[in-house]
């Protein structure tokens, strides 16, 4: 079988598996966020928190919950790293410097998992398992909560209440993320991922001598790292490390975990707004972009333009033998079209166009299918924009799901789509204009510029992958990328919740013959077009200086 | 003003309590449950898939690539590059591996890639040098390796730097050299490589590959070196 055919079959198998769980998981998640009943374990948690899970929150209260919980998360994780040297069970790992500890705390709370440290030599069991992996769960649960709040904004009328943040946070963690993670983690161990609490220990070698390994709770962290679209690796090589991703099967399982919640949430959305076909229309737009990007990535990586790859006879630099070109390309697209940022191959050594595809995937706003929760709300904001543009074309007041998209709503949507590009482009420009940040580059020319553009694209969009030649452990990068991650995560959430609150207060508009049918394929097409045009107009000049210049030269 | 300060205080306390409770659930109970299940069901894999020779000696992990090098001529010279021990099958290059610089009581290997782009001068040179070396090392009397025969994985570094596998093409390319060094018939080594070539899982998942450590262990057993 040719590698290309095997790659296509792997992609089809992935689609079949995702299709199989789409309805049951999507419906289950809709029930989780609509049910009046609390599990016993949840009641204990609410009691410990001191919150009443049945209180309805208006958007400012919901937002305050999100921000307070996340602020405490940043502080806790920062202090945990600063104190690592004095904590038991740290295996001799030292405390992390202030700038790197801030960067890492911001990174994991913002669901980004950008890592300016080397997992192997920086973080012990306590910080990895008790700090970083915890944020992998809760930052994902926060993302889904905000998405559900927006969906409720569409579904509810003449109320301002969007649900209860504590209930959404706890339910997402307890009923969705933990059960799937337990199953996935055991499957990963079955493939060969490690799961132990051994310290650093020596192991004999074939030619004599000893190699030293870290033990660790790797499989359990790997499962939630993919499922929660987090991406922070236990080891520096992330999912390219054989202990994190041992074979072709674990590789497909990890891609499945990355995509399963974001895709299935469109079903949850359809259920909650009372029309699963509205969910299908959103899903169609997501799948179109995902399949298109994967096809382009496979094409450029199999064709391997670029002097070094031509001379080597294939673009295998930074890729593992057991995954090959196809398994790496599928993973790279899934991780950058979501907010995951885990890598099973190193994007910096992709072809010029291949690197550009990973960057463009993030710059779309990570909405095809996007991060857990953030993908859905990002896509719904884009849908609002698409409806607005369609309304302008026919001269009607735009409506979406029975809600008027008025001045107030479109302002929030516009602010949402401006935040990340502003962060990416301003920080990139500043880093290029200043004398020292450029010293961190490994590659020169267009690719050197791409390293910096990639870093801020990844940070502000909460992805976390890198053109990792960039030495990001400097005070400048730790601080600015840390800020980009926090602002890129929480400012959009402010606008999403404000939008949700405004929608929930409205009276529903009755559907007429003039209403744009947003459950039809035509709308999916309009949505894809809107996304590509907005992103293209925003980022084309920057992309032209980086990956396009590199790709066209090779 | 006082009420808003008090409300904020109450909110932050609730947030802290929520984080602590969820830390117990997600940071302690969850990993312990998974570790328990993993150690019960798959103890060998959960502890790193260690490989033992017939005499019970651990010689590494089937998942972690190793280097097969000759001892340095001057062990104290940090600049000397160790030469490959050509009696054994050689793995892929690993130019991206790092060395431990922080927690220096250990000599940990830092997994990683080179992160060089396709137009990077270093990478172009590394590929060229690696290709020349592969052609030189594997050309034996009566069997000449052409540069066009060298597969891409033989001259590029993997993502982790710890790739335990090589492609079947690269393993086959090394057969004549290994046979000559051990005074074995080419057919016997060919059979050894064929026996240690794993096809795609279920015929289409992943790529065909050869585990270098297990191949070398089998070779050692065959030759009794």
Image (cartoon, coloured by chain):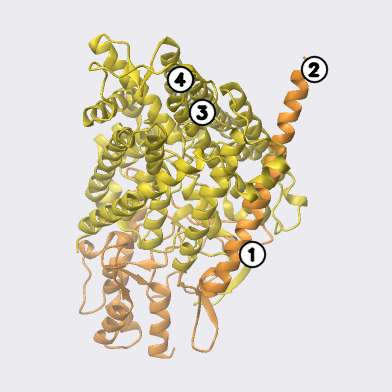
* Residue beneath disc 1: A197
What chain does badge 3 belong to? A
B135 sits left or right of A95 in the view:
left
In this rendering, the label closer to the viewer, 1 or 4: 4
Quadrant hosting residue B202: bottom left
The quadrant of the picture occupied by the N terminus of chain A is: bottom left
Can marks 3 and 1 be said to lie on one chain? Answer: yes
| Tint applied to chain B in the drawing | orange
* Residue beneath disc 3: A488
Residue A290 in the image, given as x and y percentages of width and height: 30, 41
In this rendering, the label closer to the viewer, 3 or 4: 4
Is residue B3 depicted above or below A172 in this figure? above
Is residue A201 depicted above or below A133 in this figure? below
Q: Determine crowd level at label 3: few under 14, some 14-19, many 20+ residues with C-alpha closer than 10 A.
A: many
Q: In this rendering, does residue A473 appear at all?
A: no
CB atoms of marks 2 and 1 within 8 Å: no
Residue drawn where x is 71% and y is 51% of the image: A94
**Nearer-N-terminus badge (1/4):** 1
What chain does badge 2 belong to? B
Residue A345 in the image, given as x and y percentages of width and height: 39, 51
The quadrant of the picture occupied by the C terminus of chain A is: top left
Residue A447 in the image, given as x and y percentages of width and height: 38, 36
Residue A130 in the image, given as x and y percentages of width and height: 66, 51
Determine the CA span between mark 4 and mark 2.
32 Å
Determine the CA span between mark 1 and mark 4.
49 Å
Depth order, front residue of A217/B163 = A217
Which chain is painted in yellow?
A: A
Can marks 2 and 1 be said to lie on one chain? Answer: no
Label 3: state its secondary structure: helix
* Residue beneath disc 2: B2
Q: Determine crowd level at label 2: few under 14, some 14-19, many 20+ residues with C-alpha closer than 10 A.
A: few
């Amino acid at each position: 079988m040719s590698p290309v055919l095997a790659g296509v079959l792997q992609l089809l198998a992935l689609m079949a598996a995702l299709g199989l769980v789409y309805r049951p998981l999507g419906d289950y998640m809709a029930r989780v966020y609509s049910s009046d009943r609390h599990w016993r374990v949840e009641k204990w948690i609410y009691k410990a928190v001191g919150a009443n899970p049945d209180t309805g929150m208006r958007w400012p209260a919901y937002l305050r919950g999100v921000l307070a919980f996340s602020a405490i998360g940043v502080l806790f994780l920062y202090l945990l790293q600063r104190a690592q040297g004095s904590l038991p069970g740290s295996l001799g790992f030292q405390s992390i410097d202030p700038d790197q500890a801030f960067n890492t705390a911001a990174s994991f709370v913002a669901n980004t998992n950008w890592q300016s440290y080397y997992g192997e030599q920086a973080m012990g069991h306590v910080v990895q398992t008790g700090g970083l992996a915890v944020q992998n769960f809760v930052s994902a649960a926060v993302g889904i909560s905000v998405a559900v709040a927006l969906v409720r904004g569409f579904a509810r009328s003449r109320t301002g209440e969007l649900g209860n943040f504590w209930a959404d946070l706890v339910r997402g963690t307890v009923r969705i993320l933990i059960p799937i993670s337990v199953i996935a983690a055991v499957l990963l161990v079955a493939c060969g991922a490690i799961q132990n609490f051994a310290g650093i220990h020596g192991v004999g070698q074939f030619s004599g001598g000893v190699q030293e390994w870290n033990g660790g709770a790797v499989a359990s962290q790997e499962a939630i790292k993919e499922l929660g679209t987090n991406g922070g690796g236990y080891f520096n090589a992330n999912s390219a490390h054989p202990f994190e991703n041992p074979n072709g099967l674990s590789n497909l399982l990890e891609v499945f975990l990355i995509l399963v919640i974001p895709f299935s949430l469109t079903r949850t959305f359809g259920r909650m707004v009372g029309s699963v076909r509205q969910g299908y229309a959103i899903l169609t737009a997501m799948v179109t972009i995902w399949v298109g990007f994967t096809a382009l990535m496979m094409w450029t990586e199999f064709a391997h333009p670029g002097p070094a790859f031509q001379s080597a006879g294939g673009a295998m630099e930074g890729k593992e033998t057991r995954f090959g070109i196809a398994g790496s390309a599928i993973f790279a697209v899934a991780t950058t079209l979501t907010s995951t940022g885990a890598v099973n191959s190193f994007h910096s050594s992709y072809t010029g166009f291949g690197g550009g595809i990973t960057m463009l995937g993030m710059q779309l706003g990570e909405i095809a299918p996007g991060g857990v929760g953030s993908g859905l709300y990002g896509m719904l904001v884009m849908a609002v924009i698409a409806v607005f543009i369609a309304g302008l074309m026919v001269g009607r007041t735009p409506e979406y799901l029975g809600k008027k998209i008025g001045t107030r709503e479109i302002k929030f949507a516009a602010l949402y789509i401006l935040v990340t590009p502003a962060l990416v482009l301003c920080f990139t420009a500043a880093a290029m204009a200043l004398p020292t940040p450029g010293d961190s580059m490994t590659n020169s020319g267009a690719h050197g510029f791409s390293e910096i553009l990639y870093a801020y694209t990844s940070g502000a969009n909460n992805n976390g992958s890198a053109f990792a030649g960039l030495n990001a452990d400097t005070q400048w990068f730790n601080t600015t990328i840390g800020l980009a991650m926090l602002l890129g995560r929480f400012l959009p959430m402010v606008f999403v919740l404000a939008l949700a609150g405004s929608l929930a207060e409205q009276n529903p508009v009755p559907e007429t013959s003039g209403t744009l049918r947003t459950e039809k394929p035509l709308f999916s097409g309009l949505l894809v077009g809107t996304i590509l045009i907005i992103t293209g107009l925003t980022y084309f000049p920057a992309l032209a200086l980086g990956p396009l210049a590199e790709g066209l030269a090779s | 003003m006082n009420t808003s300060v008090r409300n904020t205080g109450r909110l932050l306390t609730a947030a802290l309590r929520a984080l602590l409770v969820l830390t117990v659930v997600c940071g302690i109970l969850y990993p312990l449950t998974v570790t328990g299940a993993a150690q019960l069901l798959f103890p060998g894999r959960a502890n790193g898939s260690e490989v033992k020779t017939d005499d019970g000696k651990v010689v590494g992990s089937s998942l972690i690539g190793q280097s097969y090098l000759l001892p340095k001529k001057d062990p104290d010279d940090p600049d000397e590059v160790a030469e490959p021990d050509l009696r054994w099958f050689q793995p892929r290059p690993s130019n991206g591996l790092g060395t431990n610089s922080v927690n220096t009581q250990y000599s940990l290997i830092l997994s990683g890639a080179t992160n060089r782009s396709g137009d990077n001068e270093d990478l172009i040179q590394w590929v060229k040098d690696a290709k020349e070396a592969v052609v030189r090392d594997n050309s034996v009397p009566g069997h000449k390796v052409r540069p066009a025969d060298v597969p891409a994985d033989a001259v590029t570094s993997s993502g982790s730097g710890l790739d335990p596998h090589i492609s079947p093409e690269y393993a086959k390319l090394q057969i004549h050299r290994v046979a000559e060094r051990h005074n074995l018939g080419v057919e016997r080594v060919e059979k050894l490589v064929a026996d240690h070539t794993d096809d795609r899982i279920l015929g289409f998942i992943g790529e065909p590959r050869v585990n270098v450590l297990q191949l070398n262990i089998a070779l050692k057993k065959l030759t009794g070196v």
